[in-house]
Image: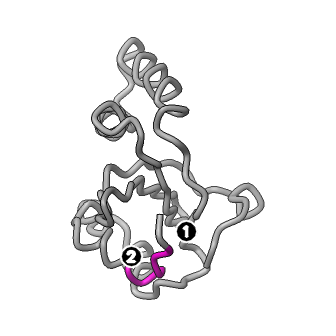
Amino acid sequence: MAKISNQELLSAILASTILAPYLEQNSELAELIKTPNHPNIHYFQNPAPAKQIMPIFKRRLGVLVAKNISHNLEATKQLVAFMEEHPDSQIYNVTFNCQTGHYGVRFSQIDDQIHVICVMTGGRIPDDLLGDSTQ
């Protein structure tokens, strides 16, 4: 992926409106997105090849369905469907880490166009577990 500035990436995510339902529920997230280089926004520059992670997410999807777990079910379905359609793609992540939880936006870039895929949510991630990110 050609280097995209944090501002461009955040603009693409916001233009997709994928965060809209979460912005209504979390005022901290709404505040966080006002600054592209906020220290709690983590732009991970090392992608995961779709072919490599697709089996993991397919297994996760199977477990979610088998155990009737709805948390991140739709996001996992969207991610698996995207990877099946674009098996040679690279999957990137931007994590918005709030005090009450995190929002991991998965996206890919195909033909110089950013495709925002889904949002996976969970509890707050301790800073030392986030690893390296470009800010």
What residue is shown at x 42% (from left), y 53% (from top)? 106
Tell me if mark 2 has few (under 14), some (14-19) or many (20+) residues whose alpha carbon lies within 10 angstroms of its own.
many
Query: x%, y% of residue 107?
Result: 39, 55
Residue 10 has which mark? 2
Q: Nearer the viewer, residue 45 or 40?
A: 45
- Is residue 86 covered in magenta? no
* Residue in the picture at 38% in, 38% down: 72
What's the amino acid at mark 1? Tyr
- Quarter where residue 11 is shown: bottom left
Q: Residue under circle 1?
A: 43
Determine which of the numbered discs, if any, sits on residue 70 in the image: none
Q: Secondary structure at mark 2?
A: helix
Q: Disc 1 to disc 2, how far (Cα)?
A: 9 Å
Q: Position of residue 45 (x, y in %)?
A: 58, 64
Q: Magenta stretch?
A: 3-9
SS of the residue at dot 1? strand
Quadrant of residue 34 within the rendered picture = bottom left
